[in-house]
Image: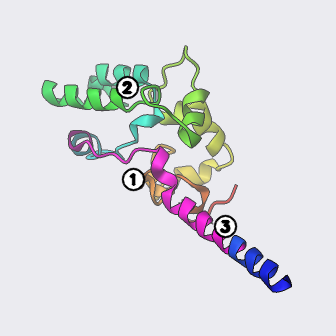
């Protein structure tokens, strides 16, 4: 009888370990990986193609309406490309799809009266990054808080977990 109970406990513990590893592997499922080729070609030529789920429709629409001054740069596009990108961003925005997990927290942190144009203006983003010193952000390997790829090694794949954070000249980040 004792052997049966011990075997059951070992099997149960092994199952949790396997499920935990599986959870890590599938974590990104609540964040889209950018696949719209027009968006990737046009936007990722200057910066990471940020996942559309980070901002609400009103933010993406305002951003697309002001491409002549896109964070100090003229990012004006051909009308057909602008329309494709706008549709993609709006269709995949934080308030267009059922958001859960980390993306729901991002979406819910944005006041309905707010229209952030930068992901770094979102309250959830600010909370997540508040402990990171300006020295680490301003170093040449990072340059800006908006350079997700500098520290989030799997950001292109939609992974933003702490275990994937490697800050240049600092190392692994553990909050």
Left or right of 147, for residue 34: left
Place of residue 122 in the rendered image (x, y in percent of width and height, measured from the top left):
55, 31
Quarter of the rendering occupied by the C terminus: bottom right
Magenta span: chief secondary structure: helix
Q: Which of 113 and 97 is in front in this view?
A: 97
Residue identified by numbered label 3: 16
Cα separation between marks 1 and 3: 28 Å
Left or right of 175, for residue 33: left
Q: Most extreme residue toward the top, as rendered?
A: 113
Residue identified by numbered label 1: 156
Please tell me whether mark 3 sits on a helix, a strand or a loop.
helix
State how the image is colored: rainbow
Please tell me whether mark 1 sits on a helix, a strand or a loop.
helix
Q: Quadrant of residue 17?
A: bottom right
Q: Identify the magenta region.
A: 13-39
Q: Is residue 47 shown above or below 124?
A: below
Numbered-mark total: 3
Q: Which of marks 2 and 3 is in front?
A: 3
The residue depicted at 20 percent of the width and 40 percent of the height is 38
Circle nearer the N terminus (1, 3): 3
The residue depicted at 52 percent of the width and 36 percent of the height is 120
Circle nearer the N terminus (2, 1): 2
Place of residue 103 in the rendered image (x, y in percent of width and height, measured from the top left):
53, 38
> Disc 1, disc 3: CB below 8 Å?
no
Q: Which of marks 1 and 3 is in front?
A: 3
Left or right of 72, for residue 171: right
Q: Most extreme residue toward the right, as rendered?
A: 2
Could one spot residue 165 in this view of the protein? no
Q: Which of 5 and 100 is in front in this view?
A: 5
Place of residue 170 in the rendered image (x, y in percent of width and height, measured from the top left):
61, 64
Could one spot residue 3 in this view of the protein? yes
Residue identified by numbered label 2: 60
């Amino acid at each position: 009888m004792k052997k049966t109970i011990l075997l059951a406990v070992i099997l149960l513990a092994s199952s949790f370990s396997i499920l935990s590893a599986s959870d890590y592997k599938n974590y990104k499922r609540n964040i889209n990986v950018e696949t719209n080729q027009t968006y990737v070609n046009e936007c990722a030529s200057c910066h990471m193609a940020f996942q559309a789920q980070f901002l609400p429709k009103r933010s993406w629409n305002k951003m697309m309406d002001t491409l002549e001054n896109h964070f100090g740069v003229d990012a004006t596009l051909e009308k057909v490309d602008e329309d494709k990108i706008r549709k993609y961003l709006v269709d995949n925005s934080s308030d267009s799809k059922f958001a859960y997990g980390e993306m729901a927290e991002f979406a819910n942190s944005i006041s309905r009266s707010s229209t952030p144009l930068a992901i770094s203006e979102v309250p959830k983003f600010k909370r997540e990054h508040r402990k990171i010193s300006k020295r680490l952000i301003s170093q040449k390997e990072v340059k800006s808080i908006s350079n997700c790829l500098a520290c989030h090694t799997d950001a292109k794949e939609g992974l933003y977990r702490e275990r994937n954070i490697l800050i240049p000249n600092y190392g692994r980040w553990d909050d």
